[in-house]
Amino acid sequence: MTRDPITRRRLLATGGAVMASGLIVPVIVPFSTPAIAKGVAPTPSMRGGSNNYRPGAPIVQRIGGGGFLMTGTVRRAGDGAPLSHQRIQIWAHTTEGHERDPHSHGATLTDENGVFRMEMPQIVPAFGQPHGHLAYDSGDFQTVFLRPVMASSKDTSLEAHFVLQPA
């Protein structure tokens, strides 16, 4: 006697008939479990990020003559929603000044999508590393200092992203 191969259709039809007879109680076993969102974790302050920080740096269109682009985003911890009109201060050691010089500091605001951008002079290595400094320090959220390091001193842009925890 030869048996017909078990196809998905035959299995479902047979299983449905058996369940309808009341002999078997259906048990649903998920093949995969849905992902559970744990939320977006806040960004911790980076060591050395607050070096040469100047509270209250003015909001400016750009720092110095420009030529280098600092960009990034600001989002809220938990749901990751973009945060508009948030003040981000930026400073660095550049071709036009040291990171401790007042003219090497400036602040900008995020747009409606939580994006910020600031043109500034080319960042050059300080203490052997080309890096920038950024700070969120407006008060609605916890202060965060970042110190991202560039892959190369020849890079002409740097990105930094903030996820902020309410104060």
Image (cartoon, grey):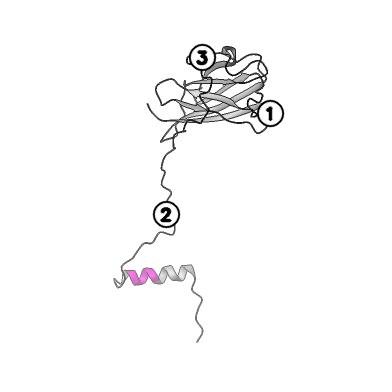
- Disc 3 residue type? Ala
In the picture, residue 96 is in which quadrant? top right
- SS of the residue under disc 3: loop
Residue 150, percent from left and from top? 63, 31
Q: Is residue 17 magenta?
A: yes
Residue position for label 1:
153
Specify whether 157 is left or right of 38. right
- The correct choice, above or below, for 96 with respect to 81 in the image is above
Q: Which mark is residue 57?
A: 3
Residue at which label 2 appears: 33
Locate residue 136, reporting x and y percent: 47, 23
Q: CA distance from mark 1 to mark 2?
A: 46 Å
Rendered position, 78 above or below 83: below
The span picked out in magenta is 15-19
Q: Position of residue 144 (x, y in %)?
A: 46, 27
Camera-near label (1 vs 2) is: 1
Q: Earlier in the sequence, mark 1 or mark 3?
A: 3
* Residue drawn where x is 32% and y is 69% of the image: 20
Q: Furthest residue to the front? A: 127
**Amino acid type, mark 2:** Thr
Return the residue nearer the eye: 79 or 150: 150
- Real-space CA distance between mark 2 and mark 3, rounded to the nearest whole angstrom: 49 Å
* The furthest residue to the right: 154
Nearer the observer: mark 2 or 3; the answer is: 3
Mark 1 crowd level (few <14, some 14–19, many ≥20, 10 Å Cα): some
Q: Quadrant of the C terminus?
A: top left
The answer to whether the residues at label 1 and label 2 have Cβ atoms under 8 Å apart is no
Crowding around mark 3 (Cα neighbors within 10 Å: few <14, some 14 to 19, many 20+) is: some
- Percent across and percent down for residue 94 are 65, 20
